[in-house]
Image (cartoon, rainbow, N blue to C red):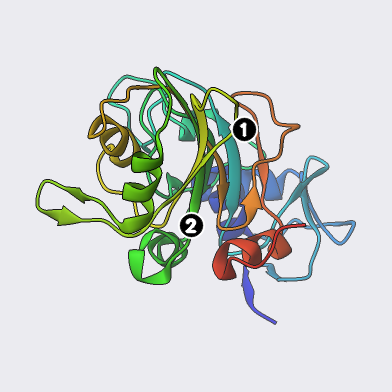
């Protein structure tokens, strides 16, 4: 069982200083498995239930958060004065070092994954791991068979040859489509459509791997991602 100091855990999970965490412990605000703890030297394990003022604090090293990103929010950890996806994370999920795994444009909505696990983020973003990202695009004009074929054949943007992408029309007039890509170059989907004279009016990410966004989340809301859901991202296993 992995053990760590209680004050270090609370500091990380509540995004406060170690001295502030020690003060909370000394005043009796912290319990381990239902018993109040007053010693800052106390350690806790992965399976211990740690609470601060009655609120459960996870003892996991990393956190993974699903956010339903609204428009006009920057997909970054520092928006230089503008609101970011990290700003939308509530206190009960907030820890030090959070960042978005990949970027969505300011006007793109939907599934943004926020974590403090750099290795996990690298793995799901790297083209060599083939983790698919699914989007719904609304267009100003109909999609043609030539557009679908170019997406699936791996089109060229500038000097870059893209990986094959799936493009599936969703409505009779073919102005709405599902797009599935396994890489993420700058403004990729918008540029792919623009090559064929189509403008993306709305773009929403609906899934990463085979983990679909929780439709119960209103724009701006988020929740922790469960372990079995993380596996759907890692291996692209069929969603249920």
Q: Indicate which disc residue 132 carries.
A: 2
- Is residue 132 shown above or below 54? below
Which element carries disc 1, helix, strand or loop?
Answer: loop
Q: Position of residue 70 (x, y in %)?
A: 52, 23
Which element carries disc 2, helix, strand or loop?
Answer: loop
How many angstroms separate mark 1 from mark 2 (CA)? 28 Å
Confirm whether residue 16 shows in the render: no
Q: In which quadrant will I find the N terminus?
A: bottom right
Q: Residue at x 69, y 50 (%)?
A: 25
Q: Residue at x 60, y 27 (%)?
A: 171
Q: From the viewer's perspective, is 163 left or right of 96?
A: left
Q: From the viewer's perspective, is 92 left or right of 32?
A: left
- Is residue 209 shown above or below 177? below
Q: Earlier in the sequence, mark 1 or mark 2?
A: 1
The residue positioned farthest toward the right in the image shown:
34
Crowding at dot 1, Cα within 10 Å, few <14 / some 14-19 / many 20+, comes out as few
Q: Indicate which disc residue 185 carries.
A: none
Q: Provide the residue designation for mark 1.
A: 90
Q: Residue at x 71, y 58 (%)?
A: 239
Q: Residue at x 43, y 24 (%)?
A: 142
Q: Position of residue 138 (x, y in %)?
A: 48, 24
Q: In which quarter of the view is residue 6 placed?
A: bottom right
Q: Position of residue 64 (x, y in %)?
A: 58, 53
- Is residue 178 shown above or below 233? above
Q: Position of residue 120 (x, y in %)?
A: 47, 65
The residue positioned farthest toward the left in the image shown:
159
Instruction: Give yes or no for contact between labels 1 and 2 (Cβ–Cβ under 8 Å).
Output: no
Crowding at dot 2, Cα within 10 Å, few <14 / some 14-19 / many 20+, comes out as many
């Amino acid at each position: 069982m992995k053990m760590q100091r209680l004050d270090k855990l609370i500091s990380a999970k509540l995004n406060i200083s170690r001295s502030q965490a020690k003060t909370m412990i000394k005043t009796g605000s912290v319990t381990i498995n239902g018993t109040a703890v007053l010693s800052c030297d106390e350690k806790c394990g992965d399976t211990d239930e740690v609470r601060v003022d009655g609120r459960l604090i996870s003892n996991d090293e990393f956190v993974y958060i699903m956010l339903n990103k609204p428009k006009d929010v920057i997909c970054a950890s520092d928006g230089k004065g503008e609101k970011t996806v990290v700003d939308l994370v509530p206190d009960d999920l907030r820890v030090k070092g959070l960042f978005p795994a990949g970027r969505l444009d300011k006007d793109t909505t939907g599934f943004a994954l926020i974590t403090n696990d750099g290795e996990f983020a690298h793995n799901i973003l790297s083209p060599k791991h083939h983790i698919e990202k699914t989007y719904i695009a609304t267009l100003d004009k109909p999609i043609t068979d030539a557009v679908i074929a170019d997406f699936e054949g791996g089109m060229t943007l500038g000097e870059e040859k893209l990986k094959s992408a799936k493009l599936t029309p969703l409505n009779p007039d073919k102005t709405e489509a599902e797009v599935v890509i396994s890489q993420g170059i700058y403004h990729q989907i918008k540029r792919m459509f623009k090559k064929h004279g189509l403008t993306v009016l709305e773009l929403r990410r609906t899934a990463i791997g085979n983990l679909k966004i929780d439709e119960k989340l209103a724009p701006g809301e988020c929740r922790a991602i469960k372990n079995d859901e993380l596996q759907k991202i890692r291996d692209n296993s069929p969603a249920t």
